[in-house]
Amino acid sequence: MRSLLVLVIAVILTAWFGGLGVRLWREITEARARCRAAWTKEQRLLTAIERMLDEEKALTGQIYDLTEAGTKLQGQMESLRSDALKRKTSGSKRLLVINTRRQPADRDWIVTLVCLTPARPDSHPAVTQEWTRGRDYLVWARTEAEARERALRRFHTRPDMVVKASAAAPPELLTGEGSAPEFLPPLPVSSKVSR
């Protein structure tokens, strides 16, 4: 009987310690898995931070390059503005071409248009002065009256535009002899509305 009691106690203790061992082993395994997951997450975060730092360096370099390019462009824009202002105030010979359509019977006419009121109140004084002095346009038409009409038709939305003068263009104008004026590209063609 005593041996049976010892045997039962041994089985109970073994079962209890065995269950404890299994529980303990399971907890150790779970703790290891949690540590491994935390380490993996930490490595991912470190990799992401390194990538973000590299991107930040690249973006900082791009910002520096763009700022430098913007400064250069502003300098070029200022020099172009001053050159344009010098040309406008110097009264250089300049012809604006109203359109590029030309018939075989058309002749070259120079029409000077004057704006009675400035385009905008905040316009630069040189631009306002140029408009009050008049701008020369190269117009192709059969007659002088038709040339005047075509020039005014181009500015049909501006009732304050008037023709100051018109004359046949000198023959050396388009042949390149003498001091030829500076030609600017044609103005965009607007819808045809006559006055």
Image (cartoon, grey):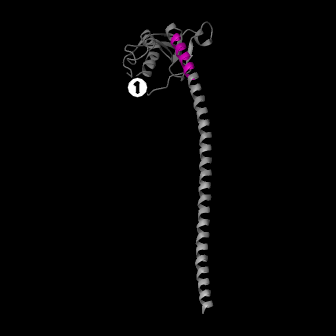
Give how far across and how far down residue 58 sits, in percent: 62, 36
What secondary structure is found at the residue carrying circle 1?
A: loop
Q: For this view, does 121 lie left or right of residue 46?
A: left
Q: Quadrant of the C terminus?
A: top left
Considering the whole magenta stretch, tell me its main secondary structure.
helix
Residue 79 location in percent, x, y?
56, 16
Residue range highlighted in magenta: 73-87
Q: Residue 167: horizontal and vertical position, in percent?
A: 49, 9
Q: Relative to 60, does residue 142 appear above or below in the rendering?
A: above
Number of on-image labels: 1
Query: In this image, 3 relative to 74: left or right?
Result: right
Q: Quadrant of residue 70?
A: top right
**Tag 1: amino acid:** Val
Q: Where the N terminus falls, by quadrant? A: bottom right
Q: Nearer the viewer, residue 190 or 84?
A: 84
The quadrant where residue 18 appears: bottom right
- In the image shown, does 137 or 13 lie closer to the viewer? 13
* Residue at (45% x, 11% y) in the render: 126
Q: At x 62% / y 43%, what residue is drawn?
A: 50
The residue sitting at 39% across, 15% down in the picture is: 118
Q: Position of residue 49 (x, y in %)?
A: 59, 44
Q: Which residue is mark 1?
A: 193
Instruction: Depth check: give the residue in front, 140 or 163.
Output: 163
Between 155 and 43, the one nearer to me in the picture: 43
**Residue 68 highlighted magenta (yes or no):** no
Residue 80 counted in the magenta span? yes
